Image (cartoon, coloured by chain):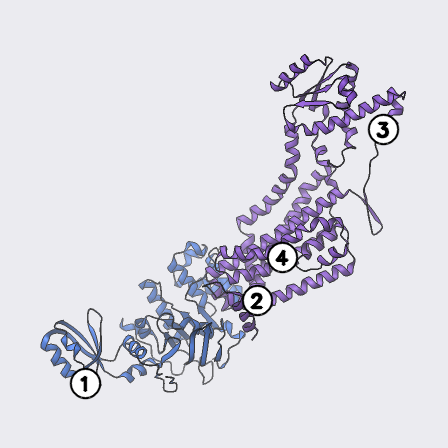
Chain colours: A purple, B blue
Amino acid sequence: MRNMWLIIRREYLERVRTRSFLILTLLVPGIMTVVMMLPAKLATMSEKTQRLVVVTSTPQFGEMVRQRFLSATTDTDQDDEESPDANSAKKKPEEEYSIDVDANPTEAERAVLRDKVSSEAIDGYLWLSDDAIASGKVTWTSRNMAGFGERSHLSAILNRILQYQRLSANGLTTDKAEQLLKPVKVEAVRLEHGKESKGGGGGKFLEVVVMVMLLYMAVLLYGISVMRSVLEEKTSRILEVLLSSATSTQLMAGKLLGVGAVGLTQILVWVVIAGVFALPAMAMQPSFSELQIPIGVLLAFAIFFLLGYLLYSTMYATIGAITTTEQEGQQLQFFIVIPLVLSVFMLAPVVRSPDAPLVVWLSMVPFFAPVLMYARIVVQTPPLWQIALCLTLLVATIAGLLVLCARIYRIGILIYGKRPNLPEILKWLKYAKA
Amino acid sequence: MASTQPPALPSSSTQHSGAGGTVQLTNVRKCYGDFVAVENLSLSIKPGRIYGLLGPNGAGKTSTLRMIIGIIVPDSGQISVFGETLKLAHKDRFGYLPEERGLYKKMKVLEHLLLLAQLKGLSANEALKRARSWCDRFELSAWTGKKVEELSKGMQQKVQFIGAVLHDPELIVMDEPFSGLDPASTVVLKDVLLELAKSGKTILLSTHGMDQAEKLCHSICLVNHGRAVLEGDLSQIKAGYGKCNVQIKYDGDARFLQESRLVQSFNDYGNYVEVRLAPGADTQELLKLASAGARLSKFEVMEPSLEEIFIDAVSKPAVSQSAEKSNA
């Protein structure tokens, strides 16, 4: 016990003290922030003031389009709810657009506007001739296709305006038209254990993906780290010295727990950083405010990280023990990664129907459980017995693997020459029992 | 060089164990796959002695040492230490210096020594005190705060040695302790080993350097191809061979070496030849014959060197000199 504690302490301190730990610990939240913020930032950056021209035969209509367009964003927000990212990036429309009305829809004018677009005097024009309106097909001409945002935006506004027009043409007042056209907003409410919580499926899915990726990365990162350090101890021949003082089981357990503690520390630091810096920022962004993570989910994250890490790093340690170079290890680690990658692939169906029988049983499989059961807990807390059964199976598998792998480890770490083949490893298992 | 004679045997030194000796191997066998590393090896190491395990590369020395400290388990046979069957609890009473030196390169010297000593059950305070004093002795004090990788290879070896003896083990097992050391460090290490032996520690070392073993060891075991070819007290072994060797330094005709009636075999070392006399040969006859054709500057009748004994033992079918074992 004392030996294991000494090994844990060494592994922990040696890692936490390194500069790379500090950098990684600080860098990952930074990268995560950048990854989340960058697309929005980029979208905003490209949108310097756009100079647009609306071409129509009736100036009043053009003026109406202009007015609508400039004041429209709040209106249309409700329409395109499915793309919250685009909204979050929007600036005030007055800063974004300057719109001129051109009451001369002739082919000559069209050519002039084309030239203006080409020479970058304006960014685009909207062709709203009477013919075009009558045919229900108007043209938006601009230099780049990136005007996608404008296009959907425009068509929404134009549709609205045309609907008004048609309604008023049929004798309705503007107020009446407004009332009739008032859009309906769907509000998502999650009902769980009789408690209601607001929030759409989008935010929930984002939460699952972010947390699962974090879990996946952490398990992989620390598993590989365990494998590396076993290999390093083999090549530096320190293992033989350690073995003269401690048993291979103590060494292996000490290493796994020490590295695992480093991982937990890192995640804890990330959570704290996220809490201190990111939460206020998220609160500002309406769509991210749905990312409030309940404490139970955090606890589940810690448990499933630890168990997932133990499960996979036990196998990583074994690979470190039976190989002699990192290249060899990389080849073999492929087999370990497969179940992990598979479970990430299964994520989407699991989130969609977390209580389908197949999903339930797949999430019980120990090798998938860290990702799938965790995802299920986030989406919709499964029945307690399922969580209990899953954890029991997972812990039992870890215990079994630890015993098996410790045997292979014990012999493998002293082998420096060629990599043992499967029959040899099986023989070790039998031998080490004695 | 004269000072490197084996010290007087401590006849009444502190005895930790029963009659079996500090280490007792009985018919130990170890295979790796089809390769037999150690075959039917038996040996006995008495407390307070320096015991040499000698043999060429691949003879099974390292495997034997690893089995004695319990890193690997023999396929068959018994190993007992301190009079009991080898068990986990014994680990803290061993000090082990592996052949391939291994240290954590990124760790600081002092921290590393503390780790090794604490793993052997020492308290942090005690370990620190002892580590400081050992570092003084090996002139490493200025380096205790440095990382291991910043040290020269020789210095790393010293750190490794300190790590092996810091917890004051009763049995010190060293695999090729002198390899890679400069002459000055060799002398320091040799003095330390002799001192430890005098204070009652049992020292088991493996080497393929016969010279070193001949100067240092009280007892030896010669192994070849995993088998013991010779085991026992060094002086007894040598006496058993008798004064049947002649060292001759000559200049001129070397035909006397071909005289099979007198010369059983010879070994040319360049500066001199060591001649093994044929049974019943008369040294005076050889002297006459040699001086007839060559100028002699040295003609000395002596016990065979350990190297000669080794070569002789290896060339014969395995016969154990220590009386009890003979498995031809």
Q: Quadrant of the C terminus of chain A?
A: bottom right
- Give the Cα separation between the discs numbered 2 and 1: 62 Å
Q: Residues within 10 Å of mark 3 (few under 14, many from 20)?
A: few
Q: Residues within 10 Å of mark 1 (few under 14, many from 20)?
A: some
Disc number placed over residue A406 in the picture, else none: 2
Ranked by sequence position, the earlier of labels 3 and 4 is 3
User: How many numbered circles are shown?
Assistant: 4
- Give the Cα separation between the discs numbered 2 and 4: 16 Å
Question: Is there one chain holding both mark 1 and mark 4?
Answer: no
Q: Chain of mark 3?
A: A
In the image, what residue type sits under mark 1? Ala
Residue A278 showing in the rendered view: yes
The image shows residue A414 at horizontal and vertical percentages of: 48, 66
Q: Secondary structure at mark 2?
A: helix
Q: Secondary structure at mark 4?
A: helix
In the image, what residue type sits under mark 4? Tyr
Ranked by sequence position, the earlier of labels 2 and 4 is 4
Q: Chain of mark 4?
A: A
B241, A389: nearer the viewer: A389
Up-down relation of residue B312 to residue A127 (above or below): below
The residue at 78%/14% (across/down) is A58
Disc 3 target residue: A181
Disc 4 target residue: A309
Quadrant of the rendered image containing residue A250: bottom right
State if disc 1 and disc 2 touch (CB < 8 Å).
no
- Give the Cα separation between the discs numbered 2 and 3: 70 Å
B206 relative to A47 in the view: left or right: left
Disc 1 target residue: B281
A289, A96: nearer the viewer: A96
A217, A3: nearer the viewer: A217
Ranked by sequence position, the earlier of labels 2 and 3 is 3
Residue A91 showing in the rendered view: no
